[in-house]
């Protein structure tokens, strides 16, 4: 029987990557960005990227290569293994432990991402004296939920922020795969963007909306807005809106029982200008960390606060469709209803928002607009 589960090419790739990263710091930073980009896109293809995705969404897997291997099989080789006993004919085709452990070592020990607990690091011989404090600050192994946020209405009556919440973060890959599959079926090229909706592609966007609805069992939408007139600083107001939207959302999801605390939280906002983004993320992260301690008594761990390029993230594109739909209804100009108006109403009504109310006061279990 052939007992090799991966091709020699994959093992050689792992070995070459390991050697290269150990030699060059510049390559290390580039590889780190490549891995993080693969995680953000929720469509990792390399073993290293897939293992990193698992370590990000399943904190408990960071301490156990076997647990990581089982999750790897269920997530990326579901056609061969879905749980329980492993068939004799499928076992040779499954990713083997050696390859997964090597990829985990690259991600944790060289790239410094998703580090294991201090106890496990000590056992693995990787807990150096100067690293002890860093290891102690590793995030707890709580369930993770992901927030993808965007803004709209900078020239309208209402200034708005909106967000997609994936309450079980590991579902991000299923949602992304469903959207990419639908794009392939209908021949949709590029990213979903509300401003691109027109007569010629309305049906395509409605088909993509259908794919989102079919995979909405683990998602939620949140929105927050204020009247724009009289605002002294729009960017500062947006930061505050993002913060309050997250705080209200955490409380709502905990109270509803959909995402009970404690939780690890990942917040991502659509990227704009590098310098402004950096300052904005610093401010939002500081406020969220303060709120985690004072409002949630440490039951919320602020894991990631960063910007993300929507061109590689279908989930960020959904956030754009959502907040732009809100903006289209609230900031609607006089005139005939067009394709964007039709889509906006269908999107919001699909998730329980009554668009007949000019203030969008209709609430549902999936959507809360304040």
Image (cartoon, helix red, strand yellow):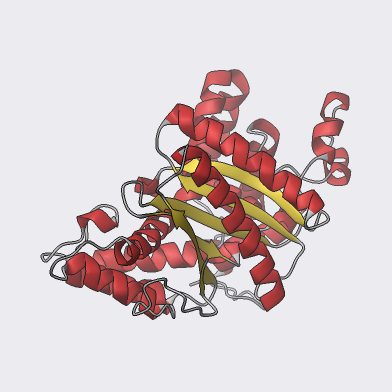
> In the image shown, does 214 or 307 lie closer to the viewer?
307
Residue located at (50% from left, 78% from top): 363
Which residue does the image show at 60% across and 44% down from the upper left? 305
Q: Quadrant of the N terminus?
A: bottom right
With 20 as the anchor, is 84 left or right in this view? Answer: right
State whether residue 349 is above or below residue 303.
below
164 to 277, vertically: above or below:
below
Residue 36 is situated, as x and y percent measured from the top left of the image, at 52, 41
Q: Is residue 290 visible?
A: yes
- Asked whether the viewer can see residue 103, the reply is no
Q: Seen in the image, is 126 located left or right of residue 242?
A: right
* Count of numbered circles in the view: 0
Q: In percent of the image, x 84 and y 24: which residue is there?
A: 130
Q: How far across and down, in percent of the image, does residue 324 sit?
A: 34, 59
Q: Nearer the viewer, residue 166 or 103?
A: 166
Return the residue found at the far front.
230
Q: Nearer the viewer, residue 370 or 202?
A: 370
* Residue 264 occupies quadrant: bottom right
Q: On the picture, is 129 further left or further right than 189?
A: right
Q: Is residue 300 left or right of residue 21?
A: right
Q: Is residue 227 above or below residue 281?
A: below
To which quarter of the image does residue 344 belong?
bottom left
Residue at 65% x, 54% y: name it.
265
Residue 241 is situated, as x and y percent measured from the top left of the image, at 54, 51
Which percent across, then down, holds residue 52? Answer: 59, 47
């Amino acid at each position: 029987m052939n007992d090799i589960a991966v091709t020699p090419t994959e093992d050689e790739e792992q070995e070459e990557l390991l050697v290269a990263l150990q030699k060059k710091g510049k390559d290390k930073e580039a590889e780190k960005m490549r891995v993080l980009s693969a995680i953000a896109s929720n469509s990792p293809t390399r073993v290293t990227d897939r293992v990193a995705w698992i370590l990000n969404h399943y904190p408990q897997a960071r301490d156990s290569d076997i647990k990581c291997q089982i999750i790897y099989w269920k997530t990326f080789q579901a056609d061969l293994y879905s749980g329980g006993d492993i068939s004799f004919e499928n076992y040779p085709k499954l990713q083997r432990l050696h390859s997964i452990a090597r990829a985990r070592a690259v991600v944790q020990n060289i790239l410094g991402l998703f580090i294991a607990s201090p106890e496990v690091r000590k056992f693995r011989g990787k807990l150096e004296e100067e690293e002890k404090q860093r290891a102690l600050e590793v995030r707890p192994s709580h369930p993770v939920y992901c927030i993808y946020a965007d803004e709209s209405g900078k020239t309208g009556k209402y200034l708005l922020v909106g967000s997609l919440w994936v309450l079980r973060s590991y579902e991000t890959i299923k949602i992304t795969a469903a959207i990419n599959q639908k794009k392939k079926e209908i021949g949709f090229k590029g990213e979903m963007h509300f401003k691109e909706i027109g007569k010629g592609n309305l049906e395509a966007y409605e088909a993509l909306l259908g794919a989102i609805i079919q995979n909405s069992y683990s998602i939620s939408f949140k929105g927050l807005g204020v009247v724009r007139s009289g605002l002294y600083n729009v960017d500062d107001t947006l930061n505050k809106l993002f913060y309050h939207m997250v705080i209200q959302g955490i409380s709502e999801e905990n109270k509803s029982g959909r995402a009970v605390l404690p939780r690890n939280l990942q917040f991502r906002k659509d990227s704009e200008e590098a310098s402004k983004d950096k300052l904005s993320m610093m401010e939002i992260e500081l406020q969220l960390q303060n709120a985690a301690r004072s409002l949630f008594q440490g039951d919320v761990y602020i894991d990631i606060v960063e910007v993300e390029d929507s061109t590689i993230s279908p989930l960020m594109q959904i956030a754009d469709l959502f907040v732009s739909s809100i903006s289209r209804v609230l900031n609607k100009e006089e005139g005939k209803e067009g394709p964007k108006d039709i889509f906006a109403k269908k999107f919001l009504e699909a998730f329980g928002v009554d668009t007949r109310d000019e203030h969008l006061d209709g609430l549902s279990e999936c959507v809360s607009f304040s």
